[in-house]
Amino acid sequence: MKHVIQGAPSFSYIEFTLSPNETLIAESGAMASMDAGLDQKAKMNGGFFGALVRKFLGRESFFVSHFTNNTGKETKLIITQDTPGDVKAIKLSGGGFYIESGAFIAREEGVRLQVKWAGFSSLFAGEGLLRNYVSGNGAVYIGGYGAIYEREVDGEYIIDSSHVLGYSKNIKIKLAMSGGIFSSFFSGEGLVARVEGKGKVYLQSRSIQNMARFINPRLP
């Protein structure tokens, strides 16, 4: 399966080229356009109970779309996301990767999407009790609000939790104050995510939560 990311970083979309018998699994409503020869089927996101968990605790859709090329030639498919921003492809080779709720766009058939316990610190950070975990062989495609950039972490790193999109399975995230009590709350930073371990972290340059806090007081 081939893909090209267009419109980056502000209004990214992914153009897939599916060879015969290839299937792409995408978030519900992610398809922008496709060749008429592609078959599209809606399926539960991991069985009935698994889909319920992903819907209400993992904040993902109950159904996902399976796009299969049953023709004898290559077909085109355009996938996008709800928010304006960047998209990235993460290649997996047997390893695992955590992605934040709402960041998942699509995955190849060889990639498995699960939900795992995130801990109460994640809940207090506004990220929910569960987190999405992808593993297997193939590519998973994630989207963010604004540009997406990477950081290689070896030790400790401080991040505003609303900017985290995904991170390697060897990374641990703990909730902490950005400074002292006075500085943390009066600087506007409050609680931050303290990243520990060795691996890669994907971040988005903008925060939907911060944008909402900016807009809400200005609404009539």
Image (cartoon, helix red, strand yellow):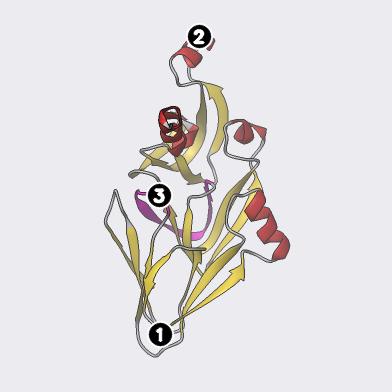
Secondary element at tag 2: helix
Q: Is residue 99 magenta?
A: yes
Sequence order check, earlier mark of 1 and 2? 1
Distance (Cα) linking label 3 and label 2: 34 Å
Q: Nearer the viewer, residue 172 or 186?
A: 186
Mark 3 lies on a secondary structure that is: loop
Q: Are marks 3 and 1 in contact (CB under 8 Å)?
A: no
**Which residue is the site of mark 2?**
182
In the picture of the structure, the residue carrying the numbered disc 3 is 83
Tell me how far mark 3 sits from mark 1, CA to CA. Answer: 28 Å
* Nearer the observer, 35 or 203: 35
Near mark 1 (Cα within 10 A), the count class, few <14, some 14-19 or many ≥20, is: some
- Residue extent of the magenta highlight: 82-100
Give the label on residue 37, or none: 1
In the image, residue 178 lies at what x, y percent? 48, 20
- For the point 50% across and 9% down, the residue is 182
Any magenta on residue 184?
A: no
Picture coordinates of residue 10, whole percent (x, y): 29, 48
Q: Residue furthest bottom?
A: 72
